[in-house]
Structures are given as structure tokens and as C-alpha cells.
Image (spheres, helix red, strand yellow):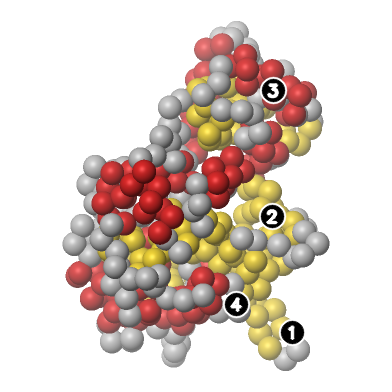
Amino acid sequence: MNIEPLLKALSEALVGEGPAVQIAADGTFTTIPQDELGLPEGSQIDIAAVVQTSGSTGTPKRTMLSVDALAASSVGTALALRGEGQWLLALPVHYVAGLQVLVRSLFGGTRPWAMDLSDGFTAQAFTAGARELTDKLRYTSLVPTQLTRLLANPTAETLSVLRRFNAVLLGGAPASPALLQAAHGAGINVVTTYGMSETCGGCVYDGVPLDGVELAIRDGRVWLGGAVLASGYLNDDTLTTAAFSHEESDGETMRWFETGDLGEQDGEGRLRVLGRADDVIISGGLKISPAAVMAGLHQVQGVREAFVGPVPSEEWGQQVAAMVVAACSLEELMSQVGTLLEPHLVPKTVVFVSELPVLSTGKPDRDAILNRLRDAATASNPSKPGTM
């Protein structure tokens, strides 16, 4: 992919000399003049990029990221990683984590290298791209599915280039303990990240907010605040007002974004994300957290990836279903899960696949997975859809 035109447009936008850049799913981009962004009259905010949310948890929205927000995110990342370096672009540029690779490179004055994604994400293409990096400090951003594929029967060369990165940022979806253990065991410095388009991407690293980022848990939900917040949604004031709020404290105004995630903080203040608030499965009146079920599945020997969601049930309303990538049999899986999870948490429908269906961003394709799980649940007992 030739990223030079995009880098030039982004560079001009970041210094306030060009219009905002909006990137399409195919990597092409258009520009939007500042006066067409629908910002309040007289606003001093310069929008550098308009990013479409992934749509993995709802209707995609076009999020406006200002120069100041992107700068705050870039500085926070550099401080957390203890230096600016050269980045390998391994994600689509219309995805906020991919865009941030370019933005951080521009702010840091380094030259990013884009791996060849023409045949999709492969270990061979990633390895070839990583070998092109020349700086002493090297970084990349991946989603768990990508790292899982890189560590599935890796070559010595792939392991070598992975170890050469000063940090591999891993976000976009929960990473299983087994994946993190495998990465650390292979000598790879993985930094888990949490964030979204509305926060200029990852803003919590290994559970700790970046410098200048505020974190709060309110009624079990994760709230994020600070200079990294987006300016709102393009041409949608109603949605912007619902998602972003202002709070006065000690004579200062803080902007907050209410995420759709449930979370908690440990004794040291580190964030633990418990899953989406709207992902709760209600089966027979019991509320079940998919994250809790996934945690149990990931403890089963041979399970590499798992996705948990609901399927309809005439008897229970909903039942737990799971799609897994594993090297064990169904009998082995169910035997171990039965000792790890309470009976109502054990999946009633399980579908084995070689790879989880994913979106272009690398995130699990929730709709595609749930459709397959519903089909499997119905096929297992046509007279009672959703039961096994």
C-alpha cells in the first residue's frame, strides 16, 4: 500500500494547514473542510481526522478527532513506551489503531513502514514488513487474532522480528491469558491497550491510564476523560450529547465519555474490563457475563480463542453458546469446563472453527459468529430452537 499521499494529507491536517482527513474502508481517503464539520460557530477546534467506528458493537459512527486530542494521545503513548520510534503498520488505516501508527510517526518524526496486506494478514507478510524497520526503537499495533496467528507454529524468523519490537501494542478485543502467556514466554513485550475511536484509540496501557487520561467506574461502567477525547460525531449532535458530558471540578471543566463496557479497578487502580454492558446473557432469569465464560474456556488446555454469546431458547429465553478455536475435542472441552464453571455458565452450544470470523479491522465479527451459533443451536434440536 502506498501511504505517502495519506501521510502528506495527515501531516497538513495535524499542523492546521489542511482539511480533515476521512479514510474509507478500502484505504482511500477524502478531505472535509473545517467549516463543513458542523462544529459550533466560532469554534477554535481543528479536526485532523474523521474515523468510522468498527461497528462491531452497533451502528458505525464517524468520530471527529482533533489535532489536540491526537497530540495528547501521541505524547501519552511516547511517555508510556519510554520513547518515540519507528512503527510497522499492520492494521487497516481506516481503523483508529492503524491511523494512530501514522499519526504517532508524524508527531515523532519517524518513517512508518506499511506491511503488505493485499493477501490479508499473514505471518510471512508481517515478518517481511518487520525486517524493513531500521530504527533502534520499534513498535507495532496488533489485535489478538493477529498475534494468535503469528504464534501458531511460528518460524524462527517470525519470532526473531517479534522479539525485536520494543513493544507490541495489543488491543481492539480482549486477549486471552493463554495468548499473553505464550507471547511473554516467547520473549515478546506485549502491552495490552484499552480504548476506542472516541478516545483516539488505546488510552489505558496494561490497565493504567496514559498521562493526562482520567478513568472512573460509575455504576459498574467504564468512563474515560481527558484531552484524548474526540470532539464528537460528525453530523450527529444528539449522539454526541448522549455519549460525551462535561463535569465541573475545582473550577475546571472535565469532559467525559461513557463507554459501553463494564469494568473494575484492582487495589492498585488497574482497570479490568469485564465485557460489554449490553452483552449480558439472561438465561432462566440469571444474568451471565460472557467474559466470565470466556475466562473459563481460556483455562482449558488447547483453547486458543473463544467468543461467547447468546442463542435463543424457548425454555430459558437465552442460553450460552461459544465459538472456539482449539486443539482439543468437544468431550475434552466440556469435561474441563465443567470443573471450571458453574453449571449455568457452561455453554450449551459449542462450534469449533479453525479461525474466528473477523471484520476488516481484525476484531471478531460478532454478527457472523452469532448467526453461526444460532444455526448450530437450532440444528442440534429443531423442535426447540436454541437448545442442545
Where residue 379 appears, as percent x and y from the top left, is 52, 12
In the picture, the disc for residue 211 is 4
Q: Nearer the viewer, residue 273 or 284?
A: 273
Q: Quadrant of the C terminus?
A: top right
Q: Earlier in the sequence, mark 4 or mark 2?
A: 4
Q: Secondary structure at mark 3?
A: helix
Q: Secondary structure at mark 4?
A: loop
Q: Earlier in the sequence, mark 4 or mark 1?
A: 4
- In terms of depth relative to the viewer, which is nearer, 268 or 128? 128
Q: Is residue 264 left or right of residue 227?
A: right
If you read the primary sequence from the N terminus, does the residue marked by circle 4 or circle 3 appear first? 4
Residue type at mark 2: give it: Arg
- For disc 2, the marked residue is 272
Label 3 or label 2, whichever lies nearer to me, is 3
- Label 1 vs label 2: CA separation? 26 Å
Q: Residues within 10 Å of mark 2 (few under 14, many from 20)?
A: some
In the rendering, at what x and y percent does residue 359 appear? 40, 43
Residue 13 falls in image quadrant: bottom left
How many marks can you see? 4
Label 1 CA crowd tier, 10 Å (few <14, some 14–19, many 20+): few
Label 2: element kind: strand
Q: According to the image, label 1 marks what residue?
A: 249
Kind of residue at badge 1: Ser
Is mark 4 in CB contact (under 8 Å) with mark 3?
Answer: no
The residue indicated by pointer 3 is: 336
Q: Is residue 130 in view from this perspective?
A: yes
Q: CA distance from mark 4 to mark 3?
A: 42 Å
- Horizontal and vertical percent for residue 334? 66, 19
Q: Is residue 60 left or right of residue 282?
A: left
